[in-house]
Amino acid sequence: MGRVLDSEIKFLTGVGPRRAELLQKELGISTFRDMLYTFPFRYVDRSKFYSVREIDSTSAYIQLRGRIVAMQMMGEQKARRLVATLDDGTGRIDLVFFQGIKWMQDKLQTGKEYVAFGKPSVFNQEYNMVHPEVDEATPERLATLGTLSGIYSSTEKLRNSGLGNKVFSKLEATLLSKVLDSVEETLPQYILDSKHLCGIKSALKNIHFPENVQALVKAQERLKFEELFYLELSLLKQKLVRTSGSDGVVLKQIGNAFNRTYANLPFPLTGAQKRVLHEIRADVLSGRQMNRLLQGDVGSGKTLVAILAAMMAVDNGYQACIMAPTEVLANQHYNGIFKYLEGTGVEVALLTGNTKAAERRRIHAGLEDGSINIIFGTHALIEDTVQFKNLGLAVIDEQHRFGVEQRSRLWSKSAVTPHILVMTATPIPRTLAMTLYGDLDVSVLDELPPGRKPIQTVHWTESQRGKLYEFMRRQIKAGRQVFIVYPLIKESEKMDYKNLEEGYMAITEEFQAPEFCTAVVHGRQKPENKAFDMDLFVRGKAHILVATSVIEVGVDVPNASVMVIESAERFGLSQLHQLRGRVGRGAEKSYCILMTGYKLSDESRKRIDLMCQTNDGFELAEADLRMRGPGDFEGTRQSGLAIDLHIADLAKDSPVLSQARALGEEILAEDPQLQSPRNALLARHLKEMRFEIKDYSRIS
Ligand code: ADP
Ligand code: MG
């Protein structure tokens, strides 16, 4: 059947070259297969009739039944339209036609009863319906309306070219009658049986034209499963290819560097940190390249895991690099490591965009001859002409700030293939992470170091600013420090800096020197000023740090116990959570204060409320996912990972996703090459698939 489904869409009866071009441009449909797999995005119950009186601003597609009581032509030229007034006994509504006027004039007769199906809109403060589907309400016609009717996504252009829902649906019907008989099953019988899924023919027929609700649900289940199953199968296959290679350097020794660092730790590792280090250790012993994603909520102690992993490389004569997304953070990582280094003999260095030329030359030489063991830095590490002697491990912190491209450049800087550890504080459900991040293995730090006190989060509005200052004053008097963060969004950068500046002025006015010291950090400062102010705050000399969201990703000041987020409604959930994670690291009770204006959109209010309700990053991430969908998920947008799904939704269908992945794992464990006859169909279908997934093994 492959052949028929590969036919160009212009050859479908009713399409032709002009519509074909539109379908391609507007909906990406170029073949019969594309069309067949373009499903309705929702369904309406056509057995139900609404009354005109019921219509309100929330009405989507509805069906009315009533008499046409008047017809008239209105407007001039472009606005020329036929207006037919329908009366159903509860009220009247205008049916408006700009196109096909003549045809409608012939079809509609005043006094007769019709069924009108469409979406109400408002014109001149009255509801009307533009270009509804209209049928005479004869008993025969009413019987053929069926129950559920699919609504396909459309565009202005398509509608204007007469390719509205009714026509589109008709084309689907034509297509089905032409190809359904020859459609071949895409899942082996044993999967259909074990998962209780309906066959492909029944699924395709019912997804477009459901016989009833049960049949539609069955069809959706089957098609979602199929889609996610093949997605997972192809990811797992790719992973199999990578992990069967033998290009990973073996880090066998545990030696002085690791052991001394470990002994220098002022606290025991958490259980989760130990577990993850074991996972990493198993990877680097395997002879295969590690590609691991480490997820851990803010404050879960990822940095330490990175440092200990780096020591594993050093103990085996390899170098390690630890990349951070911002200068501030790279600095902090670098400065933070010295307290663990005593007695290790490990040489470390820091390379950022601001490293001076002489120092830069020294570092380049040290990396090339291997005298520098661990290098910290920003993306300057990638952009620079850095060459490593033998890079054994690359750690990328907060990976979503690094594009795929950037990462791939790093691996070309060493003769050996480094192990890769990507760390992120954006916790997302495991299976989803494994899907979104391609074939990376996933570790989770699901335990915070002991002694953390939960952070209390409150929402205050502008009228409570006095109270805010009072609260800050008390905290500072008690010896604590305070963050105040302003949003920084590219599109309105200028305005944002202005807000920050005004905020800073107001704070210095309110909290005057010499009693109080306020530092300020933002992207427009000279690097040395930024470093100076940052340092003031880190060393506890400044009471308040006013900053843009640059501090979001990782600054560690345990004595800071208050996080004030200005214009909190402008931040996303995961960003708010990251920011909040900057406090609550010390022994004192900490607070996060979300400042907003009085008026909030529903969605902003939801975000703010969620923040006040929970401290759990996973819970927030899942809520975020539900609210925004995974395409929008921070990080995935930039990750270059495009997964084009027809029917499944990675966020909402996560149980199906997990099932699909489990089945894929099971099958590949038994039959890695998909050579057994019962898997022949899988092997063949997998080859035909066109998931747009970046192959992570190739960039690493
Ligand atoms: P994140 O995962 O957000 O990067 P960090 O690595 O910055 O977290 O760690 C947060 C804080 O917790 C740091 O001050 C770090 O020294 C401390 N920390 C890390 N591991 C432990 C531990 N096992 N016990 C106590 N404190 C720890
Ligand atoms: Mg961190």
Image: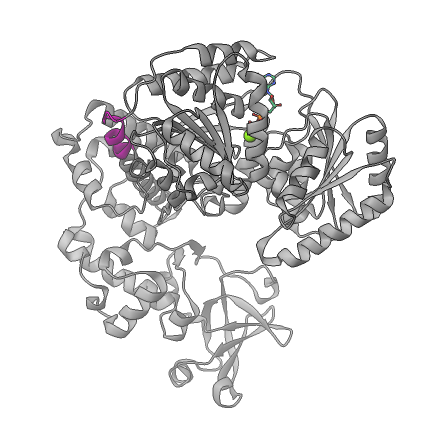
546 sits to left or right of 425: right
10 sits to left or right of 51: left
301 sits to left or right of 374: right
Residue 426, position as x, y percentages in the image: 52, 35
Which is nearer the eye, 38 or 398? Answer: 398
Q: Residue at x 39, y 59 (%)?
A: 152
Asked whether residue 209 is in view, the answer is no
Magenta span contains residue 540: no
The answer to whether residue 254 is above or below residue 242 is above
Q: Residue furthest front?
A: 358
Q: Residue at x 61, y 42 (%)?
A: 550
Which is nearer the eye, 612 or 186? Answer: 612
Residue 36, position as x, y percentages in the image: 27, 55
437 sits to left or right of 74: left
The answer to whether residue 372 is above or below residue 483 is above
Magenta span contains residue 239: yes
The answer to whether residue 139 is above or below residue 291 is below
Q: Residue at x 37, y 47 (%)?
A: 642
Q: Residue at x 81, y 45 (%)?
A: 507
Q: Provide the residue span drawn in magenta.
A: 236-247
Asked whether residue 613 is in view, the answer is yes
Residue 289, position as x, y percentages in the image: 31, 26
Which is nearer the eye, 553 or 35? Answer: 553
Which is nearer the eye, 621 or 660? Answer: 621
Magenta segment main secondary structure: helix
Q: Quadrant of residue 243?
A: top left
